[in-house]
Amino acid sequence: MDMNINEFIARALEATAQAGISPAEVSCSISDAFSVRARNAQLEDYKVSEKHSITLRGKVNGRIGTARTQALDEDSLALLIQGVRESAELIETEEQDEILPPDERYETVVNFNEALEGISAQEKIALALGIDQLMQGADARIKPDDTVVATSCSTFTMKNSLGLDLSHRSNMIYSFTSALAKDGDRAATGFKLHWGYGMDAIKPEALAAECQEDALSQLYAGRMKSGKYPVVIKGSAMSDLLSTFCGIFSAENAQKGMSLLAGKEGETIASACVTLRDDPLMDWGLASSPFDREGAATFRKNVIEGGVLKTLLHNRKTAKKAGCKTTGNAAGAGQVAPTNFYFVPGEKTEDALLAQLGDGLYLTEVTGLHAGANGVSGDFSLLSKGFEVKGGKKVRAVEQFTVAGNFYQLMKDILEVGAELKFEGSPIASPAVLVREISVAGED
């Protein structure tokens, strides 16, 4: 007979004590998701899912063993105990993950809206069909593709035999729509996403219009000539670059020789206008939480401040090796990851950045990030889209060109950071940035 989550956690800690496994810790991840897809005024896809995962850790003969399950019954308890014992026996390294009592204080974080849980499936379906209808017939050149409305709710709970008892819940809603614009032999795709913590975060008319505009703005794109250009990188494109290279700020990667920032704390690694922040306490942040996956209290910190590397991101294991304290960035399974991670905004609008640029390139999209970017060296060569800029104004869309450079150098070449910061469905974000120059391979 299955138990509920709280009953199972309590029984797991009782069972480990009876088995002489001490200290012991149980963590539980629960996620509920709903999504509906509309296309051509029809409901095309409808999904509801619930997932949960239980992890038990415990010390056996000085070694920490780990086991996992998705079953909430007595049989799985016995298998977890056995798994912890067997896992501990296989560990040979002297570097052990610890099970520790709670920190003295945890902050309050808000990224759960109870009202969102009350929105019915019928309301979400109606929203998707309504957006799909707005995409139909707006422009003869536009062929709508699909529209998705989805919600998710996740809860992460940790309890151990040393008094740790933590739980955090978050939820969100998002919707995206896509379209193909076509005129003769010319074609371009458009995409737009809205997200937030209530139905009011989704603006159907704006979402449809922005998607259509995105497609049409690229429909008559030309080619960019090869050369080196000063560039304004749109916030979403800079966010993609930061997301691709965020691993260089992990102490775990640095200690494994997979980041060139190893030992660089206190050194200037970026332009003086660059401050890079990790903020797990941001209200309504996608990755906000008062504690990390080791139960350590999280806190706001500047990884780069005024161009100077202040800290790498640590869990307890990497912090112990470096002789410092954890930064509260444990991501589970021994991994280190950022939370809400972003370049702190400056004062200039995007239009002001383009005016300062004068003549150059407005880079709006980079693709092929997995194949065309080296997460260790920082080198990248990426197929891109954007606009040619003359006299501070966008004069024509351009596509089918490649931008190449190095992320470490890019941070040093930033001249201005824009004022507008927007998280577009990801906890990693950036305002637009003005960069000294970038190499473009386009038309000869």
Image: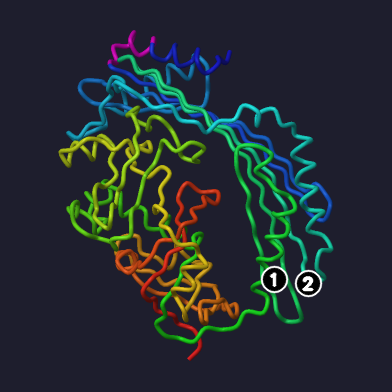
Magenta region includes residue 409: no
Tell me where residue 140 appears, x and y as whole percent.
Answer: 82, 70
Q: Label 2 sits on what residue type?
A: Arg
Depth check: give the residue in front, 242 or 266: 266
Q: Label 1 sits on what residue type?
A: Leu
Is 362 located above or below residue 40 in the figure?
below
Mark 1–mark 2 Cα distance, whole angstroms, equals: 8 Å
Q: Secondary structure at mark 1?
A: helix
Q: Secondary structure at mark 2?
A: loop
Q: Residues within 10 Å of mark 1 (few under 14, many from 20)?
A: many
Tell me where residue 125 appears, x and y as whole percent.
Answer: 77, 41
Is 64 located above or below residue 188 in the figure?
above
Q: Which residues are magenta?
A: 14-22
Tell me where residue 379 appears, x and y as whole percent.
Answer: 34, 68
Depth check: give the residue in front, 71 or 380: 380
Q: How many marks?
A: 2
Tell me where residue 119 appears, x and y as whole percent.
Answer: 71, 31
Residue 216 circle label: 1
Q: Residues within 10 Å of mark 2 (few under 14, many from 20)?
A: some
Depth check: give the residue in front, 32 or 19: 32
Depth check: give the residue in front, 414 or 236: 414
Q: Which residue is mark 2?
A: 141
Identified at 47% across, 20% down, the residue is 76
Q: Determine contact: label 1, label 2, CB under 8 Å.
A: yes
Magenta region includes residue 17: yes
Dot 1 or dot 2: first in sequence order is 2
| Left or right: where 64 falls relative to 396 | left
